[in-house]
Image (cartoon, helix red, strand yellow):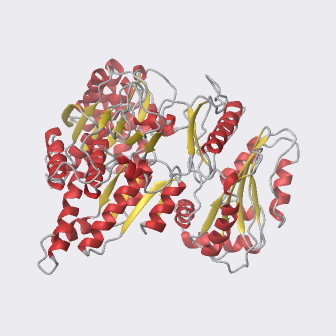
Amino acid sequence: MSVEELYSQATSVALKQHPKQTDKEIRYGTAGFRTKADMLDSIMYRMGLLAVLRSKIKQGASIGVMITASHNPQPDNGVKLVDPQGEMLEAAWEAIATDLVNVSDAELGQKLKSIVESKGIQWSNPAHTVVGRDTRPSSPALLRAVLDGIAALKGEVVDLGIVSTPIVHYVVTCINSNGAYGQASEEGYYKKLTDAFKKLRPEPTNGNYQPAVKFDGANGCGADFVKVQQRPAEGMTLAPHARCVSVDGDADRIIYFYVDDNEKFHMLDGDRIATLVAGYLRELLEASGLQLDLGLVQTAYANGSSTKYITEQLHVPVACTPTGVKHLHHRAVDFDIGVYFEANGHGTVVFSSAAQRKIAEAGADPSLSESQRAAAGRLRDVMDVINQTVGDAISDMLLVETVLHARGWSIADWSAAYSDLPNRQLKVSVKCDEKLKRVIEAEFGDRWIELTADQALTAVESILRKASNPAREKEKFHKLNQQPALEECSDMITVDQEMVRQHAQNDGTYQLLKQRIEGDTWPGSCSNEDRTVVTCVYVLQDRTVLTCVYVLQDRTVVTCVYVLQDAEQKAALIAVLDDDWTRIVDFGLQLPADADLDSVLEAMQKYLRRQRNVIVDRMDFTARLQQPGESIDEPSGTEDVVRVYAEAETRTAADQLAYQVAEVLYRYAGGVGPKPTPPQ
């Protein structure tokens, strides 16, 4: 059968068996495609087609297809692809996936041809896929749609049946490594983890550690419920100090918790797991004498105390990325050993090839002492407990139990390592409408701001990666400083100018923008009479400052980017909440022209330490806000929600801060359903 005939066949099958059910656009995000199950048939079929093309462009490497909606309600379902090394689908192909599922049935064959030609896919390459599904009633029918898509383009498939998401990632990696990573089957997955786990703990008890865990397998709620509600899973009766875990619907994240003698609930989330694991790995590296670069990666949801503990007490460097596990994974692989966990309990540890080789060699190196070889051997066994391909609740649980056993710790001992800043995370159900034109910081997507040097550098890097010519970008910064004018900014602020043109009315807004740019003053905020959305760009005499200002009825949200005059990759990003919660305000730092990044950050941090009681520096209410009716919180799939995260010095203050932001969002972002409830 010719290629043209295959395109025609794919279109024919789509029209007859898997026609599109809606013209509403759906996008591939961190969770893949996720929506109501009865809207997914055509999407599943087309993801089967795409998996074949993805395998062919990877010279026949196996590509995973997982059918799941994790912790979403039962009527939902979803699908995501797994790349050859067990990682999430390459970002550039997310857009291709989105295009493919949104074209009409009649255009499907032409779209397939376009992808093949634009990507230079060799049709003679083989195509192999691995498919898994969860236990939802809709999954078997959706599986058939995926298989039909694979068959339409003559791909081969291994159907794993009902498995967790991490198992699909594991099997894909095993197949593509020719078995070097492990046996490519569900049984091989369990055997690899359990053999290493048992080897690391010849005795079941040690000190305060007891081998008993109460396990909640997403029985109606799972890890997301425990993390957000900060209380035990429904139906669980807890004895004091009993070690409990909850995992989410597709077993890729985990939360520990317990109650003390006073029945107070204690949660040990991804931050706690990350610090526990990173600290233990540092001990093994020191004991073995291995010189490897260990680092920990967090998101803006990380509790401030965990960051302080890991850097100041354990002396492990911390990097911060935007939310979304793909961002953490990509940053973690920059280290020899990278530990990454989101606060929701999704994470793992990755070891570079060089690190794995050095660890294996050290375990058999006769020049090392017996204790050094033993530590290296233990480190090698710890690697085998870890599913390095993706966050894996089962693997992570065995890893935590390994560390607690090695240290002889109870869960209370673990909890006592440091004290979290009181925090609260809330979900606000919203419907995007004209009440809220935009709450999105154009350069940084759904990421709120952290305040460390690593986080500031990560932020500015996301801008500079967009520049096709970094040298020209640096020259542009200098030019802006020398001749501040709106025209000079045009290349950098296309989106901002467009927002002004779209939203500014005949009220002098645009003229105001030009006046602000041409001046050198530092206005505290910007608004106008009819309360439309306004975007302003300020160019100071010795600094280029891009400031996006959003006016939301009686709330003003301001975010700032500071770009140093002589810095190609240096910036500081910050937002500060004022004490009466009427607006988020920016502030200027009076620094000499030759100030470097460290000086800026030091000044910022000093200011923030003085303002700690009024700062919420990690909130995701600036998450994606797309067109009316679309999701604004990608990780939550079909839920139109915004997650609000607040920290404060006391539990009462954190609850109040989170509620106040949630209440504002409900009012101005088209809240639906029950209103946020004031804290008791």
Q: Is residue 232 left or right of residue 610?
A: left
Residue 593 place in picture, x, y as percent = 72, 79
Residue 94 place in picture, x, y as percent = 42, 43
Of the 4 image quadrants, the one containing the C terminus is: top right
Q: Is residue 197 left or right of residue 328?
A: left
Image mark count: 0
Of the 4 image quadrants, the one containing the N terminus is: top left
Residue situated in front as seen by the camera: 653 or 454: 653
Q: Residue at x 43, y 46 (%)?
A: 269
Q: Is residue 453 left or right of residue 11?
A: right
In the image, residue 438 sits, relative to residue 364, either above or below, namely above
In the image, residue 293 sits, relative to residue 163, either above or below, namely below
Q: Is residue 136 left or right of residue 184?
A: right
Residue 18 place in picture, x, y as percent = 35, 22
Q: Residue at x 38, y 52 (%)?
A: 414
In the image, residue 73 sits, relative to residue 386, either above or below, namely above
